[in-house]
Image (cartoon, rainbow, N blue to C red):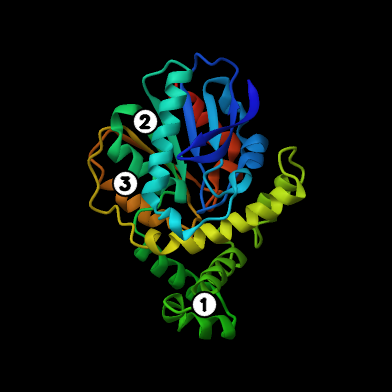
Amino acid sequence: MNQLEYKIIGGVKQYFGIYSKDTNNPILLYLHGGPGDSCLPLIEKHNLSLSESFTLVVLEQRGSGLSYYKFSKSENLSISIFVDDIYEFSKYLLDRFKKEKLYILGHSWGSVLGIKFIEKYPQLVQAYLGCGQVVNMEENLNSQIKFIGKYSSNLKVQKKLSNIKQELNGDDWVNSLLYLTRQIVKLKGSIYGKTSMNSLITPFLFSKHYSILNLLNRQRGSIQSIEYFWKELMEVNFNNLNNFKVPIILFEGQHDFHVSSEIAGNWYKNIHTKKDYYLFKESGHFPQWEEPAKFNSIILALKN
């Protein structure tokens, strides 16, 4: 099985890819980052070997990528809506493939959704896999500012940095946030050893799923998702969550300054549940695509 489908989830048409050599295998549901950063072409390029031992399902979340639509304030959107979507979709998958539980793999923003989901619905989850795990967004922002301040020699950047927190609370906060992200990328804090995101963009240009309109919609979906959810995302703090009802497995890039792997590592030490931790020494924020062979082999071994 290797196909693109869609389903009405939470009243919205949402697309997803399903990849499986044997649908009797366990379900692995991948939750992409962002918010709004759909990733089907990247999964298809780097992670399809997971379909040898799992039924791999990749959801393009509401408003993202192929599932793009223009948000409306009347929808009363919040992070909890995504958790509800994941619940509805998970129940559908479990029923379709006749399973009682599934594996959840959340990356970055998807790791926020993943933790919230396993807290609310642990009975549906075999294990949780966090990649580029978000723990505390306020601490992470401080870490980003510190990283840029330490490694940027650009005086204009340093001047901008001194006022960035105030700007993030101003009317033009989205552009200030995107500026911060661009600086981290330029300083090789997102993708290890690289000063641009080109390696993560190219697969979309050659994807059979993404037309020119879809590419434009992916960008629109990313921006609108930031506008709608970033303020709420900044309130995320999992520091006091350290007892879970499912096993926790973290995948962290040693050079991740986008979502601090140091913060995630410190949080991991305080988790009292069954757990495991894998450090990727040649990765930044995207070990699943920077070191895919290692990443895939670890997950494939989980089944055994």
Is disc 2 surrounded by few (<14), some (14 to 19) or many (20+) residues within 10 Å? many
Q: Which residue is mark 1?
A: 172
The answer to whether 224 is drawn above or below residue 212 in the figure is: below
Q: Position of residue 11 (x, y in %)?
A: 48, 40
Give the label on residue 127, or none: 2
The answer to whether 277 is drawn above or below residue 195 in the figure is: above
Give the label on residue 268, or none: 3
Pair 3/1: label in front? 1
293 sits to left or right of 255: right
Q: Using the rendered view, name the quadrant where residue 121 is placed.
A: top left
Is disc 1 surrounded by few (<14), some (14 to 19) or many (20+) residues within 10 Å? few
Instruction: Compute the Cα span from label 2 to label 3.
Output: 15 Å
- Regarding residue 191, the answer to whether it shows in the image is no
Q: Position of residue 146 (x, y in %)?
A: 43, 72
Q: Position of residue 104 (x, y in %)?
A: 42, 34
Residue at 48 percent of width and 52 percent of height? 254
Residue at 63 percent of width and 43 percent of height? 66
- The secondary element bearing badge 3 is classed as helix
Residue at the front extreme of this rendering: 74
Q: Quick one: 112 or 263, which is closer to the camera? A: 112
Pair 2/3: label in front? 2
> Which comes before the other along the chain, label 3 or label 1?
1
- Mark 3 vs 1: CB contact within 8 A: no
